[in-house]
Image (cartoon, rainbow, N blue to C red):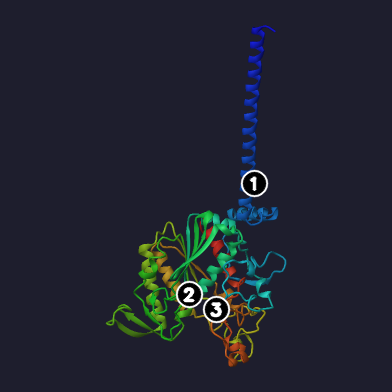
């Protein structure tokens, strides 16, 4: 072999070796990239599975689509007239007590021993129309980047917890949170940048019952002309849902002109209806001045009835809602636990505001809730203090006939609210 042939052959060999090296490097890089990409995909899938609840079924998607289509064509519904229908065929209750992440022990009747769960199956059926079936995804989209604030007493807090339970299962566990700041509790749906809040203000205006924990005072004192301490927490809400009733139920309240921090205030015993009217006027004036009326939808929940006198629905004297398992069947039943005079004061104030161009929707849940003597916690709730032997021997004596079991009646209130939020904005 000549020198030139050797050189040429050696060059070809080096070139071939260099090409092989390059190809090997490319293959190695490709393999590494493939491994990295595969690892990344597996990691994403793992994180995705970790963050999400089970995927909605085709039936869930179909129901969601049907609800959204129904919203677009939904007529105004007069929900006041109707009846409770036992519904064991559709998807009632709308959630399960033990699956709601934020259920309150005051309302968790099944957890605290209630065996008869038929109270969960009753559905309110308006006489000439249907309520929109609650759709959590539709509501969450509606309140995206918005604040929903419930303001009032423990009954409004129960409705707030009901609303959270209604949306809870539609939000992955890592994309929701709950925080409490004194009187304000905030549930956040992170993916929607939305909050559903509750603010403790049982008498709306300032009072000696404003502490969210230590508020059980024997002598109620209110500052009927002072609301800003509370109201500054609601000012920029997009949806406001108010109630204030139960804490006023006594013949007279002490009204303070001055403030609680100074000893020179003027106190006067004022008849309940008059003090309630003064507080409503202060609330009304605040709404007129501080709320953006083109942005904020405002609702007032009418009084939630109590069932503490069973003789009013044909039961025994001295008994109450204890051991009741069926609704009241008498049409237009109205018990002594609801005060029509207070209701008229609210209606008058709302009409006055409407004349000023401020639209507030009164949600009249009183009559439909009057029938539900079966739906209170009774003795099936957490007892904050140990029961005495006397109480244990007389269960009806400590039965809670004021609040409501969940799932239950407050879910219907929220279905009505859901219907009005959508139909009012069409």
Is label 1 in a helix, a strand or a loop?
helix
In the rendered image of this protein, does residue 47 appear above or below residue 160? above
Upstream in sequence: badge 1 or badge 2: 1
Front-most of 149 and 179?
179
Q: Residues within 10 Å of mark 3 (few under 14, many from 20)?
A: many
As drawn, the label of residue 103 is none
Q: Which residue is mark 2?
A: 153
Q: Which residue is mark 1?
A: 42
In the rendered image of this protein, does residue 27 appear above or below residue 186? above
Q: Which residue is mark 3?
A: 305
Q: Residues within 10 Å of mark 2 (few under 14, many from 20)?
A: many
Is label 2 in a helix, a strand or a loop?
loop
Q: With 210 as the anchor, is 29 left or right in this view?
A: right
**Taking the image as drawn, is residue 74 in sight?**
no
Dots 3 and 1: beta carbons under 8 Å? Answer: no
Whole-percent x and y of residue 226? Answer: 34, 73
Residue under the image location 33 percent in, 85 percent down: 268
3D distance between C-alphas at marks 3 and 1: 55 Å
Dots 2 and 3: beta carbons under 8 Å? Answer: no
Among the 4 quarters of the image, the one containing residue 37: top right
3D distance between C-alphas at marks 2 and 3: 14 Å
Q: In the image as oriented, which residue stretches furthest toward the left?
A: 264
Residue under the image location 56 percent in, 62 percent down: 418
Front-most of 359 and 13?
13
Upstream in sequence: badge 2 or badge 3: 2
Residue under the image location 58 percent in, 78 percent down: 370
Upstream in sequence: badge 3 or badge 1: 1
């Amino acid at each position: 072999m000549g020198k030139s042939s050797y050189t040429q052959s050696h060059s070809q060999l080096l070139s071939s070796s260099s090409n092989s090296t390059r190809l090997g490097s490319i293959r190695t890089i490709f393999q590494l990239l493939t491994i990295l990409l595969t690892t990344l995909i597996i990691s994403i899938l793992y994180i995705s599975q970790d963050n999400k609840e089970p995927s909605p079924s085709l039936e869930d998607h179909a129901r969601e689509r049907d609800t959204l289509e129904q919203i677009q064509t939904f007529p105004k519904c007069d929900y006041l007239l109707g009846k409770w229908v036992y519904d064991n065929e559709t998807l009632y209750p709308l959630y399960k007590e033990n699956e709601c992440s934020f259920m309150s022990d005051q309302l968790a009747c099944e957890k605290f021993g209630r065996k008869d769960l038929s109270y969960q199956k009753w559905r309110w059926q308006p006489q000439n129309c249907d309520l929109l079936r609650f759709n959590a995804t539709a509501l969450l989209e509606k309140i995206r980047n918005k604040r929903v604030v419930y303001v009032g007493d423990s009954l409004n807090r129960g409705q707030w917890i009901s609303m959270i339970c209604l949306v809870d299962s539609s939000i992955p566990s890592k994309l929701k949170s709950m925080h409490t700041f004194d009187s304000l509790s905030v549930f956040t749906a992170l993916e929607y940048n939305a909050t559903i809040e509750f603010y403790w203000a049982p008498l709306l205006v300032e009072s000696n019952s404003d502490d969210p924990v230590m508020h059980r005072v024997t002598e109620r004192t209110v500052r009927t002309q002072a609301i800003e301490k509370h109201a500054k927490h609601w000012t920029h809400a997009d949806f406001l849902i108010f109630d204030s009733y139960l804490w006023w139920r006594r013949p007279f309240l002490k009204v303070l002109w001055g403030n609680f921090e100074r000893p020179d205030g003027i106190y006067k015993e004022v008849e309940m209806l008059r003090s309630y009217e003064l507080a409503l006027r202060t609330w009304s004036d605040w709404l007129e001045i501080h709320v953006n009326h083109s942005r904020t939808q405002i609702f007032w929940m009418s009084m939630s009835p109590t069932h503490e006198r069973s003789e009013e629905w044909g039961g025994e004297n001295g008994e109450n809602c204890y051991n009741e398992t069926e609704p009241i069947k008498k049409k237009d039943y109205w018990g002594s636990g609801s005060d029509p005079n207070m209701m008229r004061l609210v209606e008058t104030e709302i009409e006055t505001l409407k004349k000023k161009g401020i639209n507030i929707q009164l949600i009249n849940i009183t009559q439909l809730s009057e029938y539900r003597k079966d739906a209170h916690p009774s003795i099936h709730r957490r007892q904050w203090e140990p029961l005495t032997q006397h109480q244990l021997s007389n269960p009806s004596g400590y039965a809670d006939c004021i609040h409501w079991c969940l799932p239950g009646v407050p879910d219907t209130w929220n279905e009505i609210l859901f219907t009005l939020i959508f139909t009012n904005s069409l």
